[in-house]
Amino acid sequence: MSKTTGGCLCGAIRYHLNAEPVTVAACHCKNCQKQTGTAYSIVAGVPTDSLVIESGEPKSYTVPGTSGMNTERKFCGDCGSPLYTDAKAIEGLLWLKGGTLDDTSTLEVNAEIWCDSKAGWASLDDSLPKFPGNPPVG
């Protein structure tokens, strides 16, 4: 595996991954819509212990998830780039924002999640599996 690296827009936060993503999804949840300012966010599910922050320290915004457990959204406090989400209801995975990777050429979306809250003007890919909320993992 080649070293997978990424970071925020301004470069204050840099990271690398020690494992490949286990899944890549288009997330249509309302939080991703508000965080990105568009219809959805491309998220790569990576093992929690595989993300290594090399420089900078992400800020955190915590919201209660639909499970009742917290969801922590990590972002750069300088440029505002969303970096990853730690949804406590999905143990062992972080949801890395795909656009923060230095090289996105290997990402292939394999599902659409939170389709029940899809923006009315957004289209879904007929070829992908769809889930009303969180995908089943494990």
Image (spheres, rainbow, N blue to C red):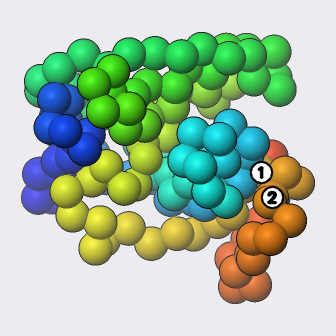
What residue do we see at 21% from left, 64% from top? 103
- Relative to 65, does residue 19 appear above or below in the rendering? below
Q: CA distance from mark 2 to mark 1?
A: 7 Å
Query: Quick one: SS at disc 1?
Result: loop
Q: Quadrant of the N terminus?
A: bottom left
Instruction: Report the residue at 42% width, 42% height from top.
Output: 96
| Residue 97: x %, y % from top left | 43, 47
**49 lies left or right of 114:** left
Q: Residues within 10 Å of mark 1 (few under 14, many from 20)?
A: many
Please tell me which residue is depicted at 59% across the width and 49% down the height of the picture.
37
> Of tags 2 and 1, which is closer to the observer?
2
Res 138 visible:
no
Asked whether residue 68 is in view, the answer is yes
In the rendered image, which quarter contains the C terminus? Answer: top right
The residue that disc 1 covers is 114
Residue highlighted by disc 2: 118
Task: Name the kind of residue labelled 1 in the image.
Answer: Trp
Residue at image position (11%, 58%) is 2
Between 65 and 60, the one lying in front of the other is 60
| Count of marks overlaid on the render | 2
Residue 58 position by quadrant: top left
Residue 11 % position (x, y): 15, 37
Location of residue 17 (image quadrant): top left
Is 68 displayed left or right of 93 in the figure?
right
Q: Position of residue 119 (x, y in %)?
A: 80, 60
Residue 127's label in the rendered image is none
* Camera-side residue of 89 and 104: 104
From what the image shows, is residue 116 above or below residue 104?
Answer: above
Q: Residues within 10 Å of mark 2 (few under 14, many from 20)?
A: many
Confirm or deny contact between disc 2 and disc 1 (CB under 8 A): yes
Disc 2 marks which amino acid?
A: Lys
Question: In this rendering, is residue 49 above or below 36?
Answer: above
